[in-house]
Image (spheres, rainbow, N blue to C red):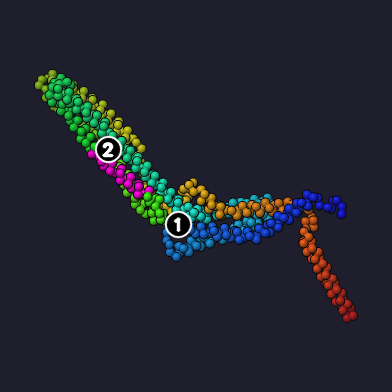
Amino acid sequence: MTDESRLSRTEARNIRNARDLESHVVWLESITGTALGVLAVASGIYTYLGVSSLLDDNGALSVFAALAYSVAVSVGIYVFWSYMMRLLPAVHTATARIGLGLSMVLGSLAIIAMSSWLNAAALAGAAAVEQHLAETVQQYQTALERADEITQSAQSLSRDVARVRQSFDDLSEQEATGQLSGFAGQGAVFRLLRQKSDELAALEAQITAQQPLVEQAFAEGNAILSRMRALTVDQGPVEARSVPFSEEAVRLANVITQLRQLSVAPLVNRAATDLADAVVLPSLDGSNSDTRAGQQATIDSVLGVLQQRATTLQAAAQDVLAMTPPADISYTPISAADAVILYAGNFIPSWAGAIAIDLLPAVLVLILAVTQAAIRAGRDGTAAEDSMTLSELRAAINAMRDMETSLDRTEGTVTRLDRQKTPAE
């Protein structure tokens, strides 16, 4: 045998590696189908649990529908990955590989759409619904605290009202002693000052009367929040807890609305506007023209003071009215599957497990594709007879002997027939 006919050491080693890989692939194929079936059945079970959480009816028809869907998912997953494991590693051309690769990506997306999110719902659906309840409680707490903050800020306007009222009380006392207009007594200027002082005193009393109602509403809201938190972490099915939770949410929304209505900022704003605009001027009761002229000048000065105090009080009320009101919160019950999607970021491990159980065969497909490529690379450039094993060579020799025996028998039969035909002719 010449050097050209002999295999190089590298080629011989490549052939041995290819044979080893082929033997491993043959053994792995014996368990791949079983493993793929187990994964498909497991995914179908979790899909059944996820579908069951979406169905409102628990009757026989709903159970059958969920079972049929889960079986269809299991069969679809098994068939799809069986196709991929057989075809993708076997193709040689780049076009075929790209086409099957795109098909695998599209099929994986379809599996995620029809199965993985339901698997995630089965794995973390209850926890996701509890997360939704907890988020809702937090939103209601924020709204309650904001409503109370605005209402308490409005209640603090009583101090501004008291300061303005006190200023008019002081002016009226000065007028009574003659320090304001120069004429002692309770004349026209005194009555005007007392008029505004009484209006502000009534407003102050109204604001003070609101304080117990505000505190009561806030305490009631906190009590409802406590019950809602207890329902969030309570034992038992989360669906059963959602019903009383929804009822408490409605009560709390009413409390927040009540707190917003208890705000006296609009009332103070109107009172500040009326403080300067709605003035009943008393008749001048001076005994002579000089006295009446002095009263009129003092009244004009008082009206200017009224305008300043009204502007100050109105600005304080406007600051409260300009505060951002609490957001309108409305609790909406959601299913476990919707909750898993809504709070997907909080359940990444569950999502990863749900997707992995469906897409793990993709890793097996890639492993087979790489292995088959390595086997083909190890056999490239060698003749078929060079890559044959001893058993394959024996089988080929036996096949050739059988063929030769068959040919000999055929030739013998033809010869005898020819001899039999010759005498007759």
Which residue does the image show at 41% across and 56% down from the upper left?
Answer: 237
The quadrant of the picture occupied by the N terminus is bottom right
Q: Is 226 a magenta residue?
A: yes
Nearest to the observer: residue 89 or residue 235: 235
10 Å neighbourhood of mark 1: few (<14), some, or many (≥20)?
some
Nearest to the observer: residue 300 or residue 61: 61
Furthest residue in direction top, as rendered: 290
If you read the primary sequence from the N terminus, does the residue marked by circle 1 or circle 2 appear first?
1
Q: Position of residue 119 (x, y in %)?
A: 51, 55
Which residue does the image show at 69% across and 56% down from the upper left?
Answer: 24
Q: Quadrant of residue 37?
A: bottom right
Does the rendering let one see residue 99?
no
Q: Is residue 251 left or right of residue 350?
A: left
- Give the main secondary structure of the magenta stretch: helix
Q: Position of residue 351 (x, y in %)?
A: 52, 50
Residue 49 sits above or below residue 211 on the image: below
User: Residue 303 bears which disc, if any?
Assistant: none
Q: Quadrant of residue 412?
A: bottom right
Furthest residue in direction right, as rendered: 423
Segment tinted magenta in the rendering: 209-229
Do callouts 1 and 2 mark residues in contact (Cβ within 8 Å)?
no
User: Residue 264 bears which disc, if any?
Assistant: 2
Q: Say which residue label 1 marks.
A: 54
Q: Is residue 93 left or right of residue 227?
A: right
